[in-house]
Amino acid sequence: MGASLLDAVLAETLDPAYAQAAASRSSGGGPPRPRRWGRVVVALTMAVAGLLVAVTYDQAAASVQGRDEVRAALVDDIRTDSSVTDDLAAQLESLRSDVTRTRDDLLAASAVGQRARDALARAEESAGAVPVSGPGLLVTLANADPSADEDPVGGGTAEEDPREQVQDGDLQLVVNALWAAGAEAISINGQRLGPTTAIRFAGEAVLVDFRPVTNPYEISAIGDPDSLSAEFLASPEVGALAVISQTFGLRFEYAEEERLSLPAASVPELRSAVPAGPDDPAAPTTDPTPGG
Amino acid sequence: MIPILGLAAGVLLGLFFDPTVPVWLQPYLPIAVVAALDAVFGGFRARLDGIFDAKVFVISFVSNVVVAALIVFLGDQLGVGAQLSTAVVVVLGIRIFGNAAAIRRHVFRA
C-alpha cells in the first residue's frame, strides 16, 4: 500500500472485496453460493448499467439539440423582427415625406404660411431633420487589429484589452471636436446626430441614438473642409486621442471629402405646439412643458 | 456472455423506451454512469483474475452509484458540487484506467 492517497488510488484499482471473497471461498469458510441466482443478478445489474448509460447519453444529446434549436429559433426571431423594423422604418419614411409634402403645399397657399415654412425649414436644418450633403471631413476610428502574437488556439478566451477598442468616449471626443471646429452636420456610420442624440456604450456595442453602430466607425462631418480639418487637428483632445490610438494601435484617420451625404436624424417626438398667431408666425412658438 | 447480453439489453431498453428522468435526478446521471463503469470494469477484471463474486459485484455497483451521486449531491448543497464531481471523476477515472490496463494485460498478454 502506497504512502500517499494517490499511490493508494493508483495501486488499488480493484475492489479488495473480490480478493477477500475469493480467499474465504478457497478456505472453505463460506457456504457454496447458488450459481444461477448470482448470474441473474449480475445480468440484471449489467442491464441497469446499460440503461444508465443509454439514458444519460439521451439526456446529453437532447440538451445539446435543445440548445441548438433554441439558438436557431432566436436567430430566426431576430431576423424576422429586424426585417419588420426595416419595413416599418421605410413606411415611416414615406409617410413622413407625404406629410412634409402636404404641409408644404398647404403652407405655400398664404404669405403667413410661406413665412412659417421658411422658419420651419431653418429649424429642421438645425435639428438635423433633413438630409444634407456637401463637402466635409471624414474621420475613421477603428479597433486595433488583433495582435499577431496572440495564440489563435486559445481564441475567444483571451481577454481583449478594452483600450484596444474604440470606446464611446473616443467617439464623443471626436464628435465634440468636430462641432467645435465648426461642423454643420455630423453622422456616425450613417446615423445622423440630432440635437438630442446620445453616444453610449451598451455592453460591447456603441449605441448612437439607441441604434448600434459597429467597428470601424466613420464619422462624417459637413463643413468647410479646410477650416474644419485645421481646427479639428488643432484641438488638444484630438492630439491626445492621436497619441492614445498610436499607443494602442487604434486606427485613427481623417480625410477631406468633396461630397458627403448625410441622412436625416430621427425626428424627436413633438412635445409642444401652439397655433401660429397671425401677427408673429415665425417666432419660436415652442413652450417646453416639463416632463413632456 | 450473459452479463454482456444484459448490458446490451439495458442499452437497447434505454434507447428504445427513452424513459424520462425526474429533473432533480438529472445532474447526478453522468457521475452515476462513471461510477457504474468503474464497477463494471472492476467486475470484468475480477472475472479475468478468476476471483469474480456476484455478491461483491452487485454490492460494489450499487454502492458506487449511490455514493458517487450522494457525494455530488452533498457537494451541491455545500456549494462545491463542481469540485467534488471533478474529484469523483478523477478517482474513478484512475481506477477505470488501471482496471482497463489489467484487462488488457489479461487479454493480450502484454
Image (cartoon, coloured by chain):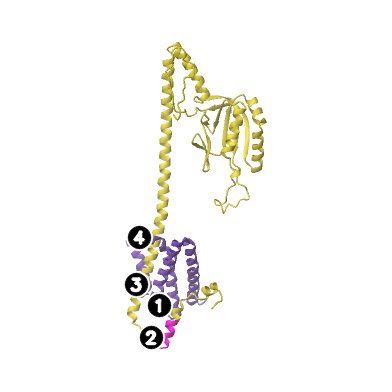
Residue linked to disc 3: A44
Residue linked to disc 2: A30
Front residue (pair A205, A259): A205
Residue linked to disc 4: B22
Mark 1 → mark 2, Cα distance in angstroms: 13 Å
Label 4: state its secondary structure.
Answer: loop
Residue linked to disc 1: B56
Chain letter of the residue beneath label 2 in the structure image:
A
Mark 3 → mark 4, Cα distance in angstroms: 22 Å
Of mark 4 and mark 1, the one earlier in the sequence is 4
Callout 4 environment at 10 Å: few (<14), some (14 to 19), or many (20+)?
few
Three-letter amino acid code at the position of disc 3: Leu
> Drawn colour of chain B?
purple
> Is there one chain holding both mark 4 and mark 1?
yes
Foreground: disc 4 or disc 1: 4
Chain letter of the residue beneath label 1 in the structure image:
B
Disc 1 and disc 3 in contact, CB within 8 angstroms: no
> Is there one chain holding both mark 2 and mark 3?
yes
Q: Is residue B30 above or below residue A210?
A: below
Find residue A34 and report its horizontal and vertical position in percent.
33, 82
Mark 4 → mark 2, Cα distance in angstroms: 41 Å
Front residue (pair A246, A124): A124
Q: Which residues are magenta?
A: A20-28
Label the magenta part by its dominant secondary structure.
Answer: helix
Foreground: disc 3 or disc 4: 4
Find residue A154 and report its horizontal and vertical position in percent.
56, 54
